[in-house]
Image: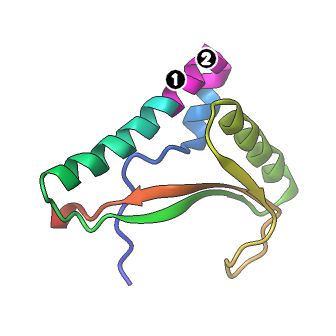
Amino acid sequence: MFAPPCFQPRLRADLLLEIERTRGRTAASTYAAAATAGVDGLRQLLDRHGIDGHVTTADDHVFATEPEATERARRVHDAAERAGLPVDWIEQSELPFSITGAVRLAGQAHLDPGAV
């Protein structure tokens, strides 16, 4: 099955950590709120104009597969939580390999740009 590319994911781990590190928690929260508004606004725009962009909803994840990466994933989780994103920490997945932990952000949107 074709998985359309993700548009405007709210959990951009490296970017969120960098914003919080260089600009502070308020800026990270502002980024998270703006990204959330962007996702919601694009969905509303497509609906308002009757555009079938084959929008689907899926969870976004930042996975760790080794202990060193688990620490970074935890930092991502904590930063996302401080920024107001409704993230979960999970330690099991349906992936065909083991993980040591993951950050999950539910409700991300995928869009097929060819259908727009």
Circle 1: is it few (<14), some (14-19), or many (20+) Cα within 10 Å?
Answer: some
Residue 24 within the magenta-colored segment of the rendering:
yes
* Dominant secondary-structure state across the stretch colored magenta: helix
Query: Does dot 2 land on a helix, a strand or a loop?
Result: helix
Label 2: how many residues lie within 10 Å, few (<14), some (14-19) or many (20+)? few
Whole-percent x, y for residue 5 in the image: 36, 62
Q: Residue at point 59% right, 33% down?
A: 16
- Quarter of the image holding residue 34? top left
Which quadrant of the structure image shows residue 114? bottom left
User: Which residue does the numbered mark 2 point to in the structure image?
Assistant: 26
| Amino acid type, label 1 | Thr
Q: Is residue 55 above or below residue 89?
A: below
Q: Are marks 1 and 2 in contact (CB under 8 Å)?
A: yes
Is residue 98 toward the left or the right of residue 81 in the image? Answer: right
- Residue 22 visible to the viewer: no
When the figure is inspected, residue 83 is found, relative to residue 88, above or below; the finding is: above
Q: Position of residue 113 (x, y in %)?
A: 22, 60
Could you say which quadrant of the image residue 101 lies in? bottom right
Q: Which residues are magenta?
A: 19-32
Instruction: Residue 81: tell me if it is visible.
Output: yes
Residue displayed at 53% across by 33% down: 32
**Percent position of residue 28, x then y:** 58, 25
> What residue appears at the point 61 percent right and 40 percent down from the top-left corner?
85
Q: Residue furthest left?
A: 49
Viewer-nearest residue: 85 or 73: 85
In depth, the one of 32 and 74 nearer the eye is 32
Q: Secondary structure at mark 1?
A: helix
Q: Which numbered disc covers residue 30?
A: 1
- Residue drawn at (26%, 65%) of the image: 112
Q: CA distance from mark 1 to mark 2?
A: 6 Å
Instruction: Please state which amino acid type lies under the numbered disc 2.
Output: Thr
